[in-house]
Image: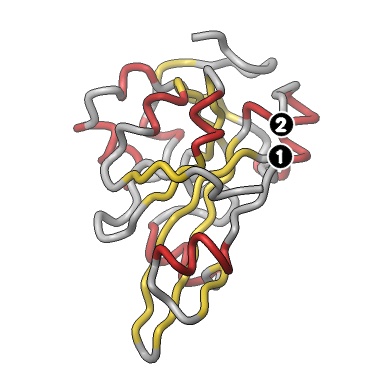
Amino acid sequence: MTNPGTLPWQPVAVELVAAPVAAALAVWPRAGEVLVAPIDPDLADTTDFCARYSVALEDSANCVVIAGRRGDDIRYAACVVLATTRADVNGVVRRRLDARKASFAPMADAVERSGMEHGGITPIGLPASWPVLVDRAVLDRSVVVIGSGLRRSKLALPSSALAELPGVEIIDGLAS
């Protein structure tokens, strides 16, 4: 795996990932392929992060938490899309969740339910009941950089590994 950008990538250390991420990596067969690097937490937002650490936007993926509502029922899902694209929340995601309305989950809900920090949410270690929707274009990259569950670090892994996470569904056209 080619290490993206100028970061000091290393094998995952539990102090550099959120607790749910560490727990998931402890049992995931592909965890040995995941690397972590510390970053300035003030640069966790994708554009600032990529500019500072020379990571191509095309190699960076965002994970967003979506809340779909149908009456009083709320269903959560995570969407993983390349940083150069946006998830089709009101079309593809809303239909997948069988919801009348879908939107980004309120920050407090996403943080509390995921056990991760805002700006660091990652598809690794999310609640088992959440589908993890991955745009097929993410898998076209050889390496992808994602959150670690914390704002102060990032993960790098082969994009093909994302397809093997629990609860993952690969969707063509999830993002545009």
Amino acid bearing label 1: Thr
User: Quick check: can you spot residue 112?
Assistant: yes
Quick check: 137 above or below 73? Answer: above
Would residue 2 be found to the left or right of residue 70 on screen?
right
Instruction: Provide residue 104's location: percent of width, then percent of height.
Output: 56, 67
Along the line of sight, which residue is nearer the eye, 170 or 165? 170
Q: Quadrant of residue 125?
A: top left
Along the line of sight, which residue is nearer the eye, 170 or 15? 170
Instruction: Provide residue 78's location: percent of width, then percent of height.
Output: 44, 55
Q: CA distance from mark 2 to mark 1?
A: 6 Å
Label 1 sits on residue? 84
Amino acid bearing label 2: Leu
Along the line of sight, which residue is nearer the eye, 155 or 78? 78
Would residue 89 be found to the left or right of residue 149 on screen?
right
**Kind of element beneath mark 1:** loop
Q: Residues within 10 Å of mark 2 (few under 14, many from 20)?
A: some
Instruction: Provide residue 110's location: percent of width, then percent of height.
Output: 47, 65
Q: Residue at x 39, y 68 (%)?
A: 97
Residues at circles 2 and 1 in contact by the CB criterion of under 8 Å: yes
Residue projecting furthest to the top: 2
Residue 50's tag is none
Select label 2 or label 1 by which is in front. 1
Q: Residue at x 47, y 62 (%)?
A: 111
Q: Residue at x 48, y 69 (%)?
A: 94
Label 2 sits on residue? 57
Q: Residue at x 29, y 33 (%)?
A: 25
Sequence-first disc among 2 and 1:
2
Count of residue discs:
2
User: Quick check: can you spot residue 151?
Assistant: no
Instruction: Provide residue 127's location: percent of width, then percent of height.
Output: 30, 56
Q: Quadrant of residue 51?
A: top right
